[in-house]
Amino acid sequence: MNCPYCSNEEHRVVDKREANEATRRRRECLRCKKRFTTYERIEPFDLAVVKKDGRREPFNREKLRTGFAKACEKRPIPQEKVDSAVDEIEAELRKEEKKEVNSSHIGELVMRKLKKLDKVAYIRFASVYRQFADLESFQDELKRLIRK
C-alpha cells in the first residue's frame, strides 16, 4: 500500500477500530508524516448486478458510493453519513445471500436511504434514476414527497 500523498510504501498504523463490518485503520506515512485511512472488509462472495438491459457486471461498491455522493453534492451531509448509508446498503444486499441482484433493487435501496437523509438529494437521484420525461412527472414525485 502506498501513501496517497507521496506514494511512499512505508507507513505505520496509528489507530485501528472495527466499524460496520470493516476494520478501519488510521495510518501515518513515515516520509511525509500525513495521515490517511484504510478500510479492510471481508467479501464473502461475489455479487453480480443485473442491469436493465440484461447485462451482468460485478457489484462495485465504489460505483454505489459515487452515485450516492453525486446526489449529496453541495448538501450539508457529512461524508460519514454517506459512507454509513453505503455500508448499510451493501450489508443489506449481502444479507439477502443472492448471487445476483437487479440494479433496480439497488436503486430503490438508495432512494430509501436518501429520502431519510436529505430530500433534495433524494429528488436529484430520483430525477436521474426514474428518468423523468417531463415536468409533470417531476412535479408528481415532488407532490408524493410532500404528502409523506
Image: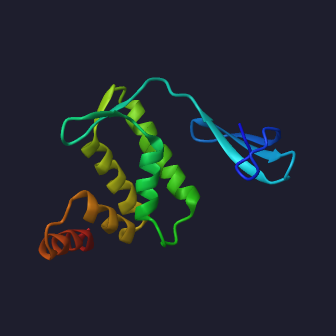
Q: In the displayed orientation, state which residue is furthest to the front.
A: 7
Q: Nearer the viewer, residue 124 or 84?
A: 124
Q: Is residue 73 left or right of residue 78?
A: left
Residue 51, located in which quarter of the rendered image? Answer: top left
In the rendered view, tell whether residue 78 sits above or below residue 6.
Answer: below
Residue at 25% across / 45% down in the picture? 104
In the rendered view, tell whether residue 84 sits above or below residue 59.
Answer: below
In the rendered view, tell whether residue 85 sits above or below residue 51.
Answer: below
Number of dots carrying numbers: 0
What is the basis of the colouring in this image?
A: rainbow
Q: Quadrant of the C terminus?
A: bottom left
Q: Is residue 108 left or right of residue 121?
A: left
In the rendered view, tell whether residue 93 sits above or below residue 142.
Answer: above
Residue at 44% across / 23% down in the picture? 45
Locate residue 96, reporting x and y percent. Answer: 35, 30
Q: Is residue 139 left or right of residue 40?
A: left
Q: Nearer the viewer, residue 54 or 42?
A: 54
Locate residue 71, reporting x and y percent. Answer: 40, 63
Q: Nearer the viewer, residue 57 or 37?
A: 57
Q: Is residue 122 left or right of residue 54?
A: right
Residue at 24% across / 35% down in the picture? 55
Residue at 53% across / 52% down in the picture? 83
Residue 103, located in which quarter of the rendered image? Answer: top left
Locate residue 146, reporting x and y percent. Answer: 26, 74
Q: Quadrant of the N terminus?
A: top right
